[in-house]
Image (spheres, rainbow, N blue to C red):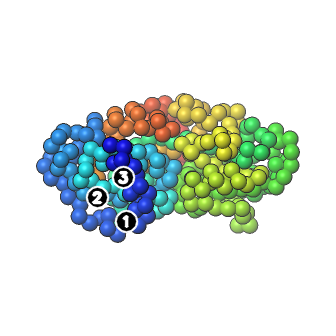
Amino acid sequence: MIKQNVSRRQFLNLMGATSVVAAGLGLAACGSGSASSSSAEGSSSSASTLSGSINCTGATSFQTLVEDAANAFMDSHEDVTITIGAGGSGQGLSDVKDGTAQIGRSDIFAEQKLEASDAAALTDNQVAVVGMGPIVNSGVDIDDISTADLKGIFTGAITDWSQVSGSKTSGAIQVINRKAGSGTRATFEQAVLQGATVPDDFKPVAEEDSSGTVVEKVNQTENSISYLAFSYYDDSKFKALPVDGVAATNENVESGDFNIWAYEHMYTKDANDVTQAFIDYMLSDDVQGSLVEKDGFISVSKMKVSKDMDGNITKS
């Protein structure tokens, strides 16, 4: 079993970026055509007859969660192959729209990125909630940051740490941003910039296309600041900051006290049996009750608030 898990994970990592063209071919499912929504194993009949391949691309913020679920699903369905690619939310939405992926992962609603007609053709499967927050290099001597200061930093109005409330030292702020098309960036800017325009002459020191790269960049760059999904938090590599005195925790996201968060969407288009079976598994108790929390996410059912595509938060 251990060897099987390892080989499948290696396959995901090696093949995820190169399987786009072939992913839509050869999909088949026999018998009942779907797995039980309460278990990856399902019945012995569905486990033995479900077959096909799934290409899943998009947001890196919950890639680890989907990889863990895919490994468990493939262990119980040996004739199913799931490849996991990255590329960001925009890429995932574009791929599922165009049919080069069966599942597009996104931190944002499809309507925020696609034409209305294209978004309407997709099915929105909200599989989890993820909190996101600002992080700084471990050498930066602040322990909290205000939304106003974040807004100033990420619009270029604040350029030195001496201008930030609570900072005891000075130094040019090194802004590490996500690339355009990133759902993490869209979520952060919606909550923090609140519609403010970013000047054309504002140039971050870097714009990265994956959360993992941001971790390493902030770790290695003095005076740097960026933002990440909670699932990537690592106290050994950077400092995560409360915002306006509110800690960046899942509990504060659930209650609505911390407002930088997003739904994790897995969009499909005319899902075939094998794709729908995997979506059903992502929504099952097996994933929602264990993998979601283990990987640092929140089950949608636990949220005491909801958020629309404009960022408006409503108490449930």
Closer-to-camera residue (199/128) = 128
Q: Residue 191: x percent and y percent?
A: 61, 46
From the image, state whether disc 2 or disc 3 is nearer to you.
Answer: 3
Q: Identify the residue position indicated by label 1 in the image.
A: 19
The span from disc 1 to disc 2 (Cα, nearest Å) is 10 Å
Contact, CB < 8 Å: mark 3 with mark 1? no
Q: Residue at x 43, y 64 (%)?
A: 17
Tell me residue 130's x, y (percent): 51, 42
- Residue 124: give x, y in percent of width and height: 37, 50
Choose top left, top right, bottom left or bottom right for residue 14. bottom left
Image marks 1 and 2: residues in contact by CB distance under 8 Å = yes
Residue topped by disc 3 = 8
Q: In the rendered structure, which amino acid carries the disc numbered 1?
A: Ser
Looking at marks 1 and 2 on the same chain, the residue that comes earlier in the sequence is marked by 1
The answer to whether residue 289 is seen in the rendering is yes
Residue sitting at x 18%, y 39%: 43
Rendered residue at 17%/50% (across/down) = 49
Residue 57 visible? The answer is no
**Secondary structure beneath disc 2?**
strand
For disc 3, the neighbor class at 10 Å (few under 14, some 14 to 19, many from 20) is many
For this view, does 222 lie left or right of residue 115? right
- How far across and how far down the image is residue 167, in percent? 82, 42
Q: Which residue is mark 2?
A: 53
Establish if 287 lies above or below 157: above
Judge left or right: residue 40 versus residue 185: left
Q: Residues within 10 Å of mark 2 (few under 14, many from 20)?
A: many
Would you call the spot at circle 1 few (<14 residues within 10 Å), some (14-19), or many (20 or more)?
Answer: some
Residue farthest toward the front in the current orientation of the protein = 3
Q: Amino acid at mark 2?
A: Ser
